[in-house]
Amino acid sequence: MTISQDSRATVAPTPRMPFPLGFVLVALVLALKAPDALTNAQFWAQDGSEFFLAQHGHLLPRVFEPAEGQLQLLLRLIAWVATLFSTVRAPLIYNLAALACGAAALASLRNLEAFGLSFGIVLVTLALVPTNGEVFGNVTNLQWLLQFYFVSMFARLSIGAQDTMVPLLRMILTAAVALTCAFPTVVVATGLSAWVWLRSRNAAAHSSPISSEWLVLAACAGAQAGVFLLDAGAQAHPAKFAFDAYVLFIDSLPTHIFGLPLVTGTLLLVSTLALVWLALRGAAPREKAFVGALALFVALPLAATAHRFAAQPGLFLSLQDGDRYFLLLKMFFWWMLALAVARHLRQWNAVPLGAIVVLLGANAVAMSPALVRRPLIDLHWRDYARRIDAGESVDVPINPPPWQFHMAGSRSSP
């Protein structure tokens, strides 16, 4: 009896690129996407109005305080760590922490090499996809970078092999990300589906129980779901779902993937599905499990977004509106193109990366203003920080205008 290569694989291939190098390369890309986050650090939206304001004057981190219907553990911890430094340095500490956490999450994608997706393709897509930049250089939108850690979890689950990282450390990382992001329940559902499907295929690599990191993730997903259900502000939006989801999903896709509507949304959707089919054609079960789980992870949060904004179906038709919801989709589209090319040109390993560089590079040239975040308005945080330290009552403007928060003076505090 012949044993397939997929069944024999009991040890995950070691990524060719070591983690420190991957981390540095991603951190460099992230820094270049929003350079003023380090050279002229300022708060962005909830950075100041939620996390700084809630933590200011408190000795312990406010880790169990929900925001927008979810726990945001890492963001609360970052706000707490920033209190160990001078107030004027707080935005810089926030931005450095966001860069480090985002780089670590994206560097975990080195294990996608097991599926023929080189880390170079990950870096190129991150660097060149058009974006309004709202996910870069702030902690408010850090979860949209942290979600890539879940992608690496799908990869480890599909490989079904021993992890070289200390299990306790992996469990801590998983808990930290799951208690910060909004979609751990989606990850559990899609991961469990992939795991059950692989076991039904009698893959030897999946004869053992599901790993401890997935059990931790499930527990954290339950906690996040409980917070969402108990939070008074987490109300379901009414759905004229069929039509509004069509507008959001279809009409918005070309603008958010290419930066402008180069093709119709329907054609782009059909093309994306075709790329998925080509990527899976003749693939081993573990590759099908990974791509299938990833596709669901892309689609389900977008469906939830469509439901949430059902009363505003045209909100996402501009690249400047809600682009953070489409970040994973952008990457997924180009990854599927790379895998589709690699599936049919296995003898030329450099072709997929070359094709992505050429096509995405041409798109990037056409959309060069959308490659980096526009510099934020200098709202003179240093002056306001000094007034806060002096105990004054002050209204602090933050980006994007007209965002602001009120800091009550120490003399007026109850």
Image (cartoon, helix red, strand yellow):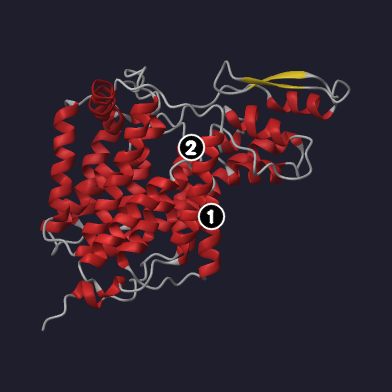
Q: Is residue 147 above or below residue 319?
A: below
Instruction: Residue 281 in the image: state x and y as whole percent.
Output: 11, 56
Secondary structure under tag 2 reads loop
Query: Is residue 314 shown to the viewer in this render?
Result: yes
Residue 91 vs residue 316, the one in the foreground? 316
- Number of marks in the rendered image: 2
Tell me which amino acid carries mark 2.
Phe
Q: Image quadrant of residue 390?
A: top right
Secondary structure under tag 1 reads helix
Residue at the spot x=26%, y=48% of the render? 335
**Image depth: mark 1 or mark 2 in front:** 1
Q: How many residues crowd mark 2 within 10 Å: few (<14), some (14–19), many (20+)?
A: many
Residue at the spot x=22%, y=75% of the render? 7
Query: Is residue 117 shown to the viewer in this render?
Result: no
Residue 168 vs residue 386, the one in the foreground? 168
Instruction: Residue 124 in the image: state x and y as whole percent.
Output: 33, 47
Q: How many residues crowd mark 1 within 10 Å: few (<14), some (14–19), many (20+)?
A: many
Q: Quadrant location of the N terminus?
A: bottom left
Q: Mark 1 highlights which residue? A: 175
Q: Mark 2 highlights which residue? A: 136
Q: Residue furthest right?
A: 411
Residue 176 vs residue 320, the one in the foreground? 176
Tell me which amino acid carries mark 1.
Ala
Q: Is residue 388 above or below residue 340?
A: above
Q: Image quadrant of residue 315?
A: top left
Task: Give how far apart the Cα atoms at labels 1 and 2 are.
Answer: 23 Å
User: In the image, which disc is placed on residue 344?
Assistant: none
Residue 401 vs residue 250, the one in the foreground? 250
Upstream in sequence: badge 1 or badge 2: 2
Residue at the spot x=13%, y=64% of the render? 347
